[in-house]
Image (cartoon, coloured by chain):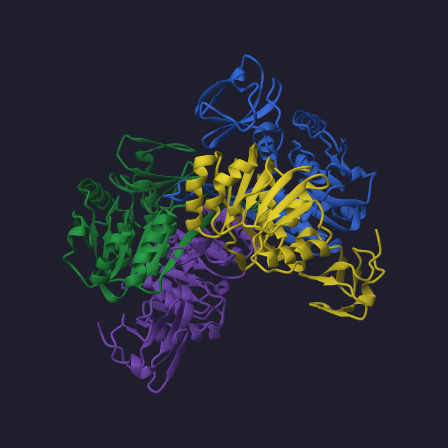
Chain colours: A yellow, B blue, C green, D purple
Amino acid sequence: MDKIKEGDYITLVATDKRYLIHIIRGRMYNTKNGSISAEDIINKIPGEIVNNIGIFKPTIEDIIMYGIKRKTQIIYPKEASLIQIKLNLQNGMKVFECGTGSGAMSIFFINAISPDGILYTYDREISFQENAKENLKRFGFYKNVKFISKDINEGIEEKDFDAAFLDVKEPWKYIELMKNVLKPSSNLGIIVPTTNQVSRTLKELKKYFIDIEVIEILTRKYKINPDRLRPEDIMVGHTGYLIFAR
Amino acid sequence: MDKIKEGDYITLVATDKRYLIHIIRGRMYNTKNGSISAEDIINKIPGEIVNNIGIFKPTIEDIIMYGIKRKTQIIYPKEASLIQIKLNLQNGMKVFECGTGSGAMSIFFINAISPDGILYTYDREISFQENAKENLKRFGFYKNVKFISKDINEGIEEKDFDAAFLDVKEPWKYIELMKNVLKPSSNLGIIVPTTNQVSRTLKELKKYFIDIEVIEILTRKYKINPDRLRPEDIMVGHTGYLIFAR
Amino acid sequence: MDKIKEGDYITLVATDKRYLIHIIRGRMYNTKNGSISAEDIINKIPGEIVNNIGIFKPTIEDIIMYGIKRKTQIIYPKEASLIQIKLNLQNGMKVFECGTGSGAMSIFFINAISPDGILYTYDREISFQENAKENLKRFGFYKNVKFISKDINEGIEEKDFDAAFLDVKEPWKYIELMKNVLKPSSNLGIIVPTTNQVSRTLKELKKYFIDIEVIEILTRKYKINPDRLRPEDIMVGHTGYLIFAR
Amino acid sequence: MDKIKEGDYITLVATDKRYLIHIIRGRMYNTKNGSISAEDIINKIPGEIVNNIGIFKPTIEDIIMYGIKRKTQIIYPKEASLIQIKLNLQNGMKVFECGTGSGAMSIFFINAISPDGILYTYDREISFQENAKENLKRFGFYKNVKFISKDINEGIEEKDFDAAFLDVKEPWKYIELMKNVLKPSSNLGIIVPTTNQVSRTLKELKKYFIDIEVIEILTRKYKINPDRLRPEDIMVGHTGYLIFAR
């Protein structure tokens, strides 16, 4: 495995905390288990442990959770992972996404359909797309993707998508449009935070799609003491309702 | 999109029920919304709806849930999806799995690392591996995979894996072995059904790995009536505890 | 403790199954652990175990779950218990309930406010109230209660209630009424099964009440094998949304 | 209803925050919705709203959550409520509790068995019992209770309890003792925070009790915006495992 060099992005693990850092000579990085300098890290092989701090290549989860700059609420790995499965993502697929947001979901999509697929990601907010592009470039995911800064109300040029995903405020406005740009046997995914949005979306979905599902995901983490095994005191209670159809 | 022909596997959707069927001339397929004949389906394009029954190309979820023959308890999509993310699966990776079981997880792994990766899947039960191979062949996933019918207690020839996954009764016995066959910056995933197994596994993991997580996933499905939105009365309460480390 | 005699209601426990039976000479009672006759039970002291079958005085939970005749969907102990706390029920209180339904919640209320309190329970369905009365009589809870067969749309004679509980289809219609019949510092509880009902109720509640809470309760049971501790495979996913205010 | 006077304990409600205060002339009380003086509160009737701050008589839940002084981890209302039901608490019962802790659970027990029942509450830590006594006195629950500062290892004088509850580190040590001091048809409840404790307790319980249950309770609160109904972002993930038997 390649040695770490200046400019790399690296995940530090100090006990149960993770830090995604950019290696720049002269810098010190503070962690729960003390400080470590860029010089301590350069030329190490990922996987080594220095002064009780683990040095790793960032996973996609690390990138999403600790690496990307957020200009919007992001979709978390627990939801992103189910979305991948429910949209049946495979190498070579042509996928539609709106909105781009901070690009978190885009990274999951690009990873799932690479090396031969392509993601078309729409957002009418140019500043969001600029930020998302930077996020993708920084971590090597600016490939297999086209950014389109446009309100999809005005129409979508491409069609025959293998899957589509909507993360917008009023998804019910775009259901018919999704039907028209998806291949007939394809899957649509939607995320919304409130039950009112679920109800309005369902009403519209039932006109154009079948096999509709509404799902919430709860994940519970445990404290990792083997002799005192118990869940964490606090858990995430809600990120969003996932809606799928085909 | 290609027309459906004899020999294809197809998913039928009748309201909220799914059926994964093998198209053989002369056969009738019963669904919640009535029967449909092979002849009604052949030459249709996936995505069409005939007599209130949707005709679709099977997704990977359909294949896992309704298509594969089960000789063992399988890992469900909600767990499988998080495992993919936590193991940081990407095209081109070399992945270790034990045991193969019915091949459900193998399908997820092969999909995530294709077209350039490879899965080594171990199971000492030859009958399980034969069944799993048939499952993979039937649905086009018998590629990018090597089956090894062997007890991993006797050792693993390959090494430098990018990720490893254990679905065995006594994972604590193989933690050191996993450490030795994984690349240093790689991720290990484990699933066990009981808290006692979690405790024993954690004890051993802490000797060789860091960044350990224990996670349970609960998914809640909703009835899709927009004017009477509410969760299903019954939900899956438990499949397994997921353990991850690197 | 008194010996069991003919006519008593008794809970049989056979491993993990419970049966609430009425002791009548000559009858046989089938359980998971085999049959037992009335004669085997009569003159035993509650708490004894006969032929691997436990013989107990029914708890309120037994009565609600296995004893009462149901003409309506009932409120389960997990919800009932939180309702008791949130309504701050204490001996001597005067409590309002609508509708009576099968009387399950009435039993909890009567138990919590006895011996000095009183429950006024309304239901416009006379047949429901007749059934509920029978349920209360059968298990010794027909005390500290007044049944009123009337649509509360037509008004409520009593006032100055210490707590009120609504289990009706359109609770939003009665919020102002509740405000008028409750003492100023009292608590209101409501149960509804759908999110749409929660939204409509909240809109109206905010006009007349403060300190509003919406709560769902999930309970997870575990298999009681100490060496293979794990949750049950299936759990109850939903009974209702609880709303409280004062 | 009586007017509020100096010395009373009062719950202030400012939007979604609650404050349990002691009314002392000259004091100001800060809330989310601004300050309020003791003089503004004295002579008001509970239930009034002053300057957008609700003034209420404290409920038992208020007392437990915001009123009592905590020297130990307390049992929360969501668990306490189910414990009441599962122990089948009724007026007149004689109940055993160990340990007293901060007296939170004692308050629930005393409320449930009053006016005719009695609680025997044991704790070997005299300082805990002194604190708990003060908590009970402050809020009017120092009645129907006997405090015993003693290690129950040394034995329990009383017997024939109608219900017993253990909140101790090693409940498995006291299971046989519980069997001996409970009436034969009575219920035992136990709370422990870890799965390891559940396993050890179950092993012992199975020797002396039947009808054993292990239950976790999760409650999910919702944001009360009717047009944007959704669960709170964060929820309590764990307080304890409840074990019941008879």
Q: Is residue D37 above or below residue D185?
A: below
The residue closer to the viewer here, C26 or B206, is B206
Residue C223 seen: no
Residue C5 occupies quadrant: top left
User: Relative to B20, is C27 on the left or the right?
Assistant: left
Quadrant placement of the C terminus of chain C: bottom left
Q: Which residue sits furthest left?
A: C157
Q: Which residue sits furthest top?
A: B26
Residue C51 seen: yes
Residue C199 horizontal/vertical position (percent):
36, 53
Residue drawn at x 67%, y 32% as measured from the top left? B103
Residue A236 horizontal/vertical position (percent):
53, 56
Residue drawn at x 37%, y 72% as measured from the top left? D136
The residue closer to the viewer here, B72 or C58, is B72
User: Relative to B180, is C187 on the left or the right?
Assistant: left
The residue closer to the viewer here, B158 or A97, is A97
Residue C54 horizontal/vertical position (percent):
40, 41
User: Relative to D46, is C230 on the left or the right?
Assistant: right
